[in-house]
Image (spheres, grey):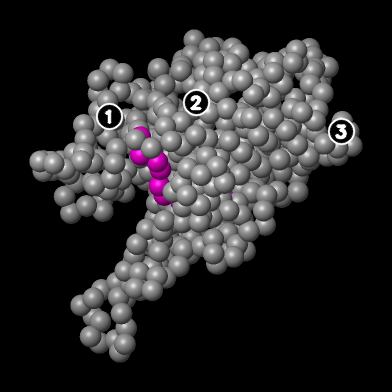
Amino acid sequence: MTDADAIASAVLEEFSNLPAKRKPSVRDNGLHEWVPMAGIVAKGPNGLKCVALATGMRCLPASKLPQANGVAIHDWHAEILAIRAFNRFILEECRRLALQGDGASQSEFIYRRIIAQHENQGQQGTAEVWQGQPFAWREDVSLHMYCSEAPCGDASMELIMAAQDDASPWEVPSPTPGDLPTQAQAPTPASADGTPLPGRAYFSQLGIVRRKPSRGDAPPSLSKSCSDKLALKQVTSLLSSLTSALVSPANAYLSSVILPESQYSAAACSRCFSSSSADGGRMAPLLDTSVSAKLEGAGYAFREFRVETTKMEFAFSRRAILPPNNPSTDTTDMADVKDAKPKKLIASNLATSWALNGPHDGEGLVGGVLQGRKQFDLRGASLVSRRKMWTLARDVCSVMALDDDGEIKRVLGSTDLVWDEIKDGSSLLEGRRRAKQETKRVALKGWVRNTGGGSFKLE
């Protein structure tokens, strides 16, 4: 078994252990639900271990972001939800170590940093920029992601084009008087320089930042594609803004992304994620000496991941439910098959989030909140919601002594600051903001921020 197969197998096996209520189903009308899945695997001295996984394929429209209030998740595409679950996993590990005190407990994934260790590394010329984070991901544990589908956006454009009878961009229908604007009818969101920010249309434009693809009648969204968000993670690491205030990003980068062979386009993945100028890699500008110096000065670096393939398929992918050349997909032959009915697919509304140190059954989400709850009800906040993640980060701060000047506790433990003030204004995250801005300036041009829903605070 190759490393890619082993990584895929670790994620697929963990998902298979979840109860049926966390998985797509066959509806009463005979429709077979399908869903993308992604998982993150840690590879270290103890072998491979899936630490987080998720399914999902939806995001909040821009009009609903102001109501999110830290409760509803903005983007629950599988790749992004898996990264959120991974951050929850890390913060839970931090809390466990903090509760048990220095030296009282060990983690095979993270360790407690102290200034003395950093200064010793500095004398050896190996230290990264010290930003006061009390924890770090272990150097001997690498991180890998398995995705059951090609990430939406630039990495999947060739696959989308190949699936069309006509690869021309879809025409935008004219609105009917009195109709509310939809994704198809609303003006295409534009970047700072006025260029369009398309979904899956405009096939001739490759290597550009895109928003999440959606149906033509869907309300507009500015949530960026998974391809773009994963490309940015090659600079910012897998850590979210909150987690990066407590954990050094130095070792928390993906080493590889594993895709099914059927979902891999070498040209698309090279263009989307690589720094190879020969292959048209859009991340090539990050290799410029001055750009690298700016990233390093901010405490970050460009860490390019490999894209590898596996023959393994997720049981709830479209291809597994309707295999190519399967007679059940060809209705012309149904008369020859007694009692046989052609399978029909429908996208599942259910998303699932799971972490190794979280609830054994994981969580089920619909509309960005816990299944069965109203969309913006505080009781519907998932463990990976902004509100619950901030609460956990504050818990970590409250139970440990920190080597910094108290800035981490002051900011993360605040009951006065709102979310946006922490993410966009706090000095704790200044380096992360600079790294993101530089990456968008030279490589991911045209990135438009998806703002709203950040005016809440913790009590």
In this rendering, position of residue 446 left or right of residue 121 = left
In this figure, which residue is indicated by the disc labeled 3? Answer: 101
Which region of the structure is painted magenta?
Answer: 53-62
CA neighbours of label 3 inside 10 A, class few (<14), some (14 to 19), many (20+): some
Residue shown at 23% from the left, 85% from the top: 335
Residue 126 location (% of width, % of height):
72, 18
User: How many dots with numbers?
Assistant: 3
To which residue does mark 2 refer? 455
The reply to whether dot 3 and dot 1 touch (C-beta < 8 Å) is no
Q: For the residue carrying disc 1, how many other residues have a C-alpha within 10 Å: few (<14), some (14-19), or many (20+)? A: some
Q: Is residue 363 above or below residue 110?
A: below
Q: Pointer 1: what residue?
A: 189
What percent of the width, then of the height, locates residue 446?
A: 33, 23
- Quadrant of the rendering where the C terminus is positioned: top right
- Depicted 117 relative to depicted 382: above or below: above
Of circles 3 and 2, the one toward us is: 2
